[in-house]
Amino acid sequence: MITVTHRRYVPYSHAHYAGNLVDGAYSLGLFGDVATEVCIQLDGDEGLFASYSDVQFKAPVQAGDVLEITGNVVHMGNRSRRIYFESKVVCRGTSGSAAQVLDEPIVAVTAVGTVVVPAHS
């Protein structure tokens, strides 16, 4: 159907916990950005996020990471679109300003969400 991918650097200002950990809601917000682009591409409208049916926090996200956020449309109804989301760590800060590209991305968060768009006239 359609896949949308965004990449985002996680700034240190978003770290809330020891070890520069970032809360899980950070990835959920990025899923919303991806869903907005999905709706724009498919329907010419930003749409509205209606619900999550599954959210899995699989690995920590840290300040200094680069995340790759992907949304794959898995079902299209008349006004709803169900999207499978995945947030992967593709780069990780190591110390100071040093960072590395990971050989194998780390899946940090997955979710299934539903968005709705206005009816076509």
Image: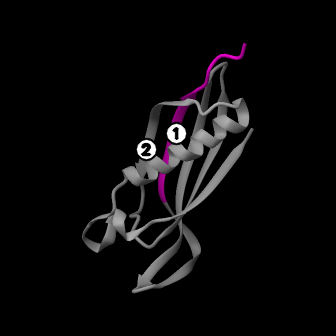
Tell me the SS state at disc 2: strand
Image color mode: one colour
Tell me the SS state at disc 1: strand
Residue 119 forms part of the magenta stretch = yes
Residue 18 forms part of the magenta stretch = no
**Residue that appears at 65% across and 44% down:** 72
Quadrant of image for the C terminus:
top right
Residue 11 on image: x %, y %:
42, 68
Nearer to us in this view, 91 or 13: 13
**Residue that appears at 61% across and 56% down:** 6
| Looking at the image, residue 80 lies above or below residue 14 | above
Q: Which mark is residue 72?
A: none
**Crowdedness near tag 2: few (<14), some (14–19) or many (≥20) residues, C-alpha within 10 Å:** some
- Prevailing secondary structure class for the magenta stretch in the rendered image: strand
Nearer to us in this view, 69 or 119: 119
Residue 71 on image: x %, y %:
61, 46
| Looking at the image, residue 112 lies above or below residue 78 | below
